[in-house]
Amino acid sequence: MYGIYRIAEANIGIRSLFPDVHALCRNYRTEAQPEISIEISPADIAAERERSALTDKQEGKPVRTFPDGYLETLAVYRKLAEKLIPSDILLFHGSAVAVDGEGYLFTAKSGTGKSTHTSLWMTYFGERAFMVNDDKPLLRCTDGGVIVYGTPWDGKHHRSTNTSVPLKAVCVLERGRENRITPLDRHEAFPLLLQQSYRPSDPALLQRTLALVSQLSAGVKLYRLQCDRKLSAAKIAYAGMKGENPCN
């Protein structure tokens, strides 16, 4: 099975064994000539199965069984992430929301509440806001700043848009009893950002990834947000990242 898709301004040709990835990427289909080619083998799917089982064991969970078609979608995105690194594009784990055409990216360990928090933004800002990607956006690091892209790999809630916006800020999310946002030093943020970035095993690509994470930390504003799950958390977070008084 074969299809061509435009993701993060790159035309990607995907040859797969199962139809799942083509259904997933249907909103990104293009008729343009591919610039990057990805082909999946049974060994790629087996490797994803092993990675999934290892993660479950490390987290003390029962080992889950996933269909081959789903595992293939993960294998495709892994290969895509590695092929985009030379183009200064980084795969990042987080939930990205846009307000008034600017992107705000929230990252944290799984289960902290990233999707819950960006849902509050969608409710609070209404038509001014839209989801860019709720799980695995792509980030292009440029001399003029960072651009965040929607992708088909958008988490269990399937919230994303086939679009891109300039990234205004990255915010490390923590649960708290009260809402409080503070600036985060780039040197303190670097290991947190690296942890949430896709890190390839190839030494040359890993070296380039480290440089991209450094560029990310220098190219956007960085914050730490302690928050509850009330609507006021969105108001305070946005005001803090805009340098405004949340009481206004």
Image: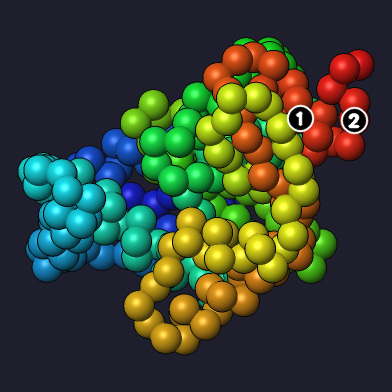
Crowding at dot 2, Cα within 10 Å, few <14 / some 14-19 / many 20+, comes out as few
- Separation of disc 1 and disc 2 at Cα? 8 Å
| Residue 196 screen position, x and y as percent | 48, 56
Residue hosting label 2 = 244
Left or right relative to 146: residue 69: left
What residue type is disc 2 on? Glu
| Residue 17 screen position, x and y as percent | 15, 54
**Element marked by disc 2:** loop
Which residue occupies 79% across, 38% down? 241
Q: Nearer the viewer, residue 112 or 203?
A: 112
Residue hosting label 1 = 238
Quadrant position of residue 243: top right
Q: State how many labels appear.
A: 2
Q: Is residue 111 visible?
A: yes
Q: Which mark is residue 130?
A: none
Left or right relative to 151: residue 102: right
Left or right relative to 83: residue 69: left
Q: Quadrant of the C terminus?
A: top right
N-terminal of the two: label 1 or label 2?
A: 1
What residue type is disc 1 on? Tyr
Left or right relative to 48: residue 160: right
Q: Are marks 1 and 2 in contact (CB under 8 Å)?
A: yes
